[in-house]
């Protein structure tokens, strides 16, 4: 509340507090450094005049030695902080440059989606190629058609950023869901479209062809579940399929097609990732659990072995993936997320 505009700018773009002490790059000043003076001034005006003051003291930062030495960040900044503001590419369109400015700066996508080196700096050579956030995995969002989102249309990406859902079945969860709820869904659509143009520069903007409809009749799917739930049939299923039938099939159908407008799991993009963390986390903590049609978490109902079993069943049966998770990793995910 007593920051000057210059102090506010230094905090956002240089990682220096008003008292001169260094901030850690968990506050993404490495990205905000790209922002223009005009946008910094607009933010300052908003914080000073549009936000009610709150006299709440944040928890003390507790890091082990040597990370608790804030002055060491000066050396880190010399190595890794690019303090030059964003420069438009004259060879690119105005829309592409707007998207680049937002992705690299204000929305700081690389903070989560770029892997980091041993000193926790973003690997610029692998920008947006995916990185672990501890309990959640921020996937590759480059335009690579195999590992990234190159197979998405721009319309799908815009819909995903504005609503958390896309026509290809993608559903946001975890930190990305928070970013959509609190940020992307509130942005002007033209800014979200600019982001899509920047991330998918070679993709046509036309709406994608609609996939063939899948069978979603509730009675048929429930009948299939009953027919398969005989002692003879149950003797042949895996523990993961047993958990799926008990906990998941009523909403997502035995074959993963989805029921009554609930998401299909067969071919879901979350099952095509280099690890299964996001699948296990969605089962542990849920997806949109505070919303009327959200999925509740199963942390209290299912043990680590059951979470691992059903996650591996989803990865293999519906994602046709060889990626697996074990109980030790599930336990780490459960312990690392306060909501699990």
Image (tube, rainbow, N blue to C red):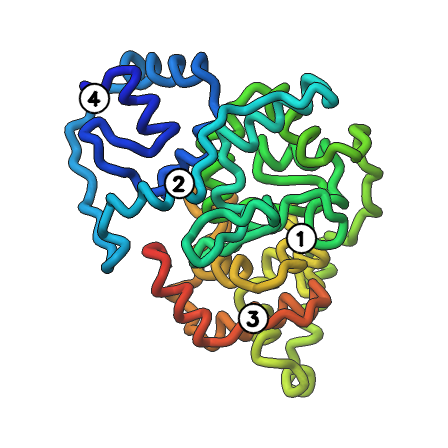
Mark 3: secondary structure = helix
Position of residue 89 measured from the top left corner of the image (x, y, whole percent): 67, 23
Mark 2 / mark 1, whichever is N-terminal:
2
Would you name the residue on which mark 1 appears? 269
Quarter of the image where the N terminus is located:
top left
Would you name the residue on which mark 4 appears? 53
Rounded to the nearest angstrom, the CA distance separating label 1 from label 4 is 41 Å
Rounded to the nearest angstrom, the CA distance separating label 4 from label 2 is 34 Å
Asked if marks 4 and 2 touch (Cβ < 8 Å), the reply is no
- When asked about the image quadrant of residue 12, the answer is top left
Position of residue 148 measured from the top left corner of the image (x, y, whole percent): 68, 49
Mark 2: secondary structure = helix
Position of residue 255 measured from the top left corner of the image (x, y, whole percent): 71, 64
Mark 1: secondary structure = helix
Which of label 2 and label 1 is nearer to you?
2
Label 4: how many Cα within 10 Å (few below 14, some 14–19, many 20+): few
Q: Is residue 228 visible?
A: yes
Rounded to the nearest angstrom, the CA distance separating label 1 from label 3 is 17 Å
Mark 4 / mark 3, whichever is N-terminal:
4
Mark 1 / mark 4, whichever is N-terminal:
4
Which of label 4 and label 3 is nearer to you?
4
Q: Residue at x 45, y 48 (%)?
A: 121
Rounded to the nearest angstrom, the CA distance separating label 4 from label 3 is 46 Å
Above or below 52: residue 128: below
Would you name the residue on which mark 3 appears? 310
Mark 4: secondary structure = loop
Would you name the residue on which mark 2 appears? 78
Q: Nearer the viewer, residue 21 or 262?
A: 21
Which of label 1 and label 3 is nearer to you?
1
Quarter of the image where the C terminus is located:
bottom left
Rounded to the nearest angstrom, the CA distance separating label 2 from label 3 is 46 Å
């Amino acid at each position: 509340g007593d920051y000057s505009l210059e102090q506010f700018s230094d905090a956002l773009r240089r990682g220096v507090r008003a008292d001169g002490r260094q901030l850690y790059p968990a506050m993404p000043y490495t990205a905000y450094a790209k922002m223009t003076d005009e946008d910094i001034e607009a933010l300052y005006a908003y914080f000073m005049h549009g936000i009610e003051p709150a006299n709440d003291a944040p928890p003390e930062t507790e890091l082990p030695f040597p990370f608790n030495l804030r002055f060491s960040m000066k050396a880190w900044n010399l190595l890794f902080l690019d303090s030059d503001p964003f420069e438009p590419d004259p060879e690119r369109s105005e829309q592409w440059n707007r998207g680049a400015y937002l992705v690299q700066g204000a929305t700081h996508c690389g903070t989560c989606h770029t892997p980091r080196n041993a000193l926790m700096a973003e690997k610029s050579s692998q920008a947006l190629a995916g990185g672990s956030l501890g309990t959640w995995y921020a996937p590759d969002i480059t335009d690579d058609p195999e590992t990234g989102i190159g197979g998405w249309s721009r319309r799908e990406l815009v819909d995903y950023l504005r609503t958390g859902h896309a026509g290809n079945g993608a559903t946001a969860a975890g930190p990305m869901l928070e970013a959509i709820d609190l940020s992307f869904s509130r942005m002007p659509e033209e800014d979200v479209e600019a982001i899509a143009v920047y991330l998918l520069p070679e993709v046509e903007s036309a709406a994608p062809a609609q996939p063939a409809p899948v069978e979603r009749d509730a009675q048929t799917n429930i009948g299939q579940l009953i027919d398969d739930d005989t002692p003879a049939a149950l003797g042949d299923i895996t523990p993961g399929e047993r958990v799926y039938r008990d906990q998941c099939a009523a909403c997502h159908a035995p074959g993963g097609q989805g029921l009554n407008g609930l998401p299909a799991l067969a071919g879901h993009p979350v099952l095509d990732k280099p690890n299964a963390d996001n699948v296990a986390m969605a089962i542990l903590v849920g997806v949109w659990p505070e919303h009327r049609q959200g999925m509740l978490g199963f942390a209290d109902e299912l043990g680590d072995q059951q979470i691992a079993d059903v996650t591996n069943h989803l990865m293999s049966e519906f994602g046709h993936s060889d990626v697996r998770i074990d109980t030790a990793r599930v336990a780490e995910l459960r312990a690392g997320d306060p909501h699990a």
